[in-house]
Image: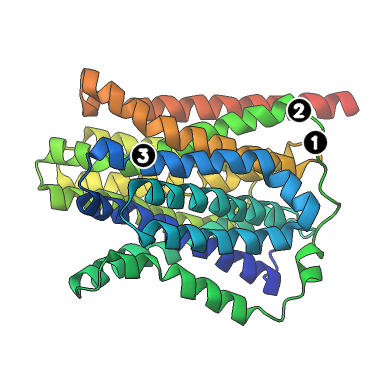
Amino acid sequence: MQLTRDRLTWLVYLQLGCYGYFLYGFGPAIPLLRLEQEVSRGVSGLHGTALAAGTLLTGVVFAKLTARFGRGAAMWLGVAGTCAGAVLLTASTALPVTLAGAFVAGFFGSIVVNGSAVILADRRSGGGPAAISEANATAAGIGLVAPLAIGLAVAQGLGWRLGLLMVVPLSAAVAVAFRGVRAADHRAGLAEAPVVGRRLPGRYWLAWLVLVMCIAVEFCMTIWSSDVMAERTGVSSGAAATAVTAIGLGMFAGRLAGGRLALRFDTAHLLLAALALAGAGFAVFWLSTAAWAAWAGLVVCGLGISLHFPLGVTRAIALSGGRPDLAAGRVSWAAGLAVGFGPFGLGALADAVGTHRAFLLVPALLAAAACCVLLTMRSATRECAVAA
């Protein structure tokens, strides 16, 4: 297999990068917004719930949007809507307005995520998995700039809003740079028109469950790992916050390398290896009492996590029975459920047994995801035998 990066490929990479900028900036912006709104952490956490709710709605309408307007137009609609959500989030301190902004950004941003996966997966050269991995690496790389921009804006007395709103000129720059890409280019790599209305096969839902568990692992690690690091290693809360940076660096490096690996190895076996790598990194982190060892474990864990979503969504689309747009839309349900309930479930468990013990939920999810991957492989093998 080979990966050809034409103008359409780079456009999709950067469109996903625009949403990555907003998403990575959303996390550090919400605590700053909470101070202005003078609300509890629980109430402020509703912004994450609103983001997840928007993602769930995308799962209902995505296939209809692409059937009606085409995938290319849907992508630009998603980028524009993400910018609108960012503007709405920063326009006021009124809670209903900011929650609406998070919901709008989650809805339209998920259109970009789903659209990028469908367009890149449908490549005749067979480089879809590699392209999806590289696209997510681009999103992570651009996204890492967002917290720095917000921090710099706050340090200069300009406020966090300016840093988050940089997604607007970034999106405009992408639109100008690729204004010569015709709408037909968006559809040049599509093997067939989107199929809407037919049911997805059972093997797809197994792949969908893999995504639910993998996305839950990613958000559990990024939200709660700093608490475990502070508790186990005794470092300050500020130093413990670098745990998220360690995971992010691992994910960025893993997705860059994953593009090449996906060209050489079977997607299912590569996903199983990524699950095992994440489990090994988690074990080092969970058992460590030294900060450097815990940090190293998180980098390794991030390397494994980096490939979970790109490979998981590739397999889900491949197992959709010729319904890629419908399959991508349902991926939004997986993301919404995982983001809405994964970290919440771990937090509730931590209240009962402590954060360190509650974190054993992560390897349990990884093991369950590996079992589902094996089941889909067995199903595919059985179908091949029947066909033969």
Q: Tell me: residue 126, above or below residue 96.
A: below
Q: Secondary structure at mark 1?
A: loop
Q: Which amino acid does the dot numbered 2 rest on?
A: Pro
Q: CA distance from mark 2 to mark 3?
A: 34 Å
Q: Secondary structure at mark 3?
A: helix
| Label 3 or label 1, whichever comes before in sequence order | 3
Q: Secondary structure at mark 2?
A: loop
Label 3 CA crowd tier, 10 Å (few <14, some 14–19, many 20+): some
Which of the image's four quarters has the N terminus? bottom right
Label 1 CA crowd tier, 10 Å (few <14, some 14–19, many 20+): some
Q: Are marks 2 and 3 in contact (CB under 8 Å)?
A: no
In the rendered image, residue 229, in percent from the top left (x then y), is placed at: 19, 41
User: 367 or 24: which is nearer to us?
Assistant: 24
- The answer to whether one can see residue 178 in this image is yes
| Label 2 or label 1, whichever comes before in sequence order | 2
Q: Which amino acid does the dot numbered 1 rest on?
A: Gly
Point 55% across, 24% down: residue: 371
| Label of residue 46 in the image | 3
